[in-house]
Image (cartoon, rainbow, N blue to C red):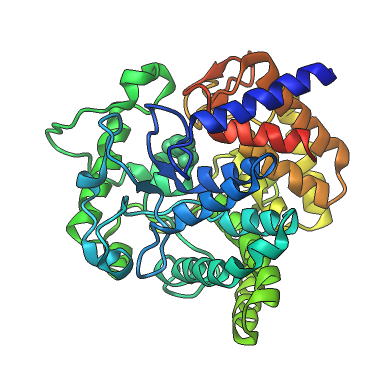
Amino acid sequence: MQNTSKILIEQAQAILRQNDRGGYTVPTARLYPFQWNWDSAICAMGWQQFDEPRAWQEIDRLLEGQWVDGMIPHIIFHKESPDYFPGADVWGVPDGCLQNGKRLPRTSGISQPPVLASCVRRLWEHSRTPQSQKARMPRLCKQMLAWHRWWWSARDPGNSGLVCIYHPWESGMDNSPAWDGALQRVLPLQNPSYQRRDTLVVDLSYRPHQSEYDRYMALVELFRGYEYAQQKLYEASPFRVLDVGTNAILQQANQDLLALVHEFGSVQEVRELEERIKLTHSVFAALWDEELGLYLSHDEISETPIRVPTSSGFLPIFAGLPTKRQVARMAAEVQRWAECCEHLIPSTSPFHPCFESKRYWRGPVWPHINWIIAQGFEKYEYTNVANRIRESTISLISKNGFQEYYDPHTSEGCGGSSFSWTAAIALLCFNR
Ligand code: GLC
């Protein structure tokens, strides 16, 4: 076993090195040839296991893409690549959105789950060279706080305590069946002339349907037309969803940022974060569904809960949001899913009619989601559940390599290969 883990660690390190494009890590060659937001934050924790300076560099390169209004976009296009669609020109972000009107790097026009502050806190607390890193911390805290404020205002203009997403890609769980209903409201592009690139690299049956892609692209066109003016997007987007995963991740990130700001920020910033955390905490319980035993996203336009059980519904445990009784209910639900799927945690409940074991976010297992949920169960001292999830992750990776995601029934690896955050999660699992 020791030999196996040594080999896996070496392979994982080699994948991160191989996907390094000069201070930032691409998720995988060809399929995703740029820097992705939450991938990068997770990769930084992987880099820290064997090359700490490179981990901090990953964060700096991600922050190069931050907008003047604080948003950290979901893709940073540091260098051009013909392998991905939609590229920088299609997003058409005006220069004025970028920091100081700088032209480079160009970016996409939406964001992704804000796991960054949680990762940076971990980098800081596990740093082997805190004296050399200390100087960068006040700046990092300012930049992360600016991003969190962007979520609180641009994506929650009514200050409800919960934020919305305007595009399925903003959830990071792009093709989740939870978005199907809300996506129907988006008129697909008429006579689309674009050519998808994803299906040139990965089997079509693992990827979203064309009808969904035409809707994704219609949203991009709409946002570009409004030049990403946030108030306009709020009023005009036919897709406005309160995503439980993004909200849970943001709540934990607020708490992690608070810990850092105590050390590196001002009293005023501490208060601001404390207030937001309290507000979110007070409204989160409304997303709980007792019958399904997990939390649900909400369609903000039809004002209805989205009763599709997905792994996202377990994420609030990461932020310490559920009561002990709710955690017991969630643990039982994970157990029930495990009776049907040998490999945990399927991204959609295996009992739901929309479950598909190989299609992108409609059933497969993602290692980083496992890692986040396992951390949550650990916090509540459900060590058995946490270990069961981690063992599942390691066994999937050791049997089938560092894939983008895995079939929860057969363990088959799907999507892109030599995948960066899968490598990072393996390194974290071995170095707990
Ligand atoms: C897919 C995933 C998204 C991820 C990206 C790069 O688009 O849905 O979460 O960030 O790939 O790995």
Q: Nearer the viewer, residue 69 or 152?
A: 69
Residue at point 48% right, 36% down? Answer: 20
- Count of labels in the image: 0
Give left or right: position of 234 versus 46: left
Residue at point 26% right, 48% down? Answer: 220
Residue that protrudes farthest toward the bottom in the picture: 268
The image shows residue 259, relative to residue 429, as above or below, that is below
Residue at point 32% right, 34% down? Answer: 212
Q: Nearer the viewer, residue 134 or 350?
A: 134
Residue 40 location, x and y as percent?
52, 45
Residue 195 location, x and y as percent?
21, 28
Q: Quadrant of the N terminus?
A: top right
Q: Quadrant of the C terminus?
A: top right
**Residue 173 in view:** no
Residue 48 location, x and y as percent?
66, 45
Q: Nearer the viewer, residue 241 or 7?
A: 7
**Residue 40 in view:** yes
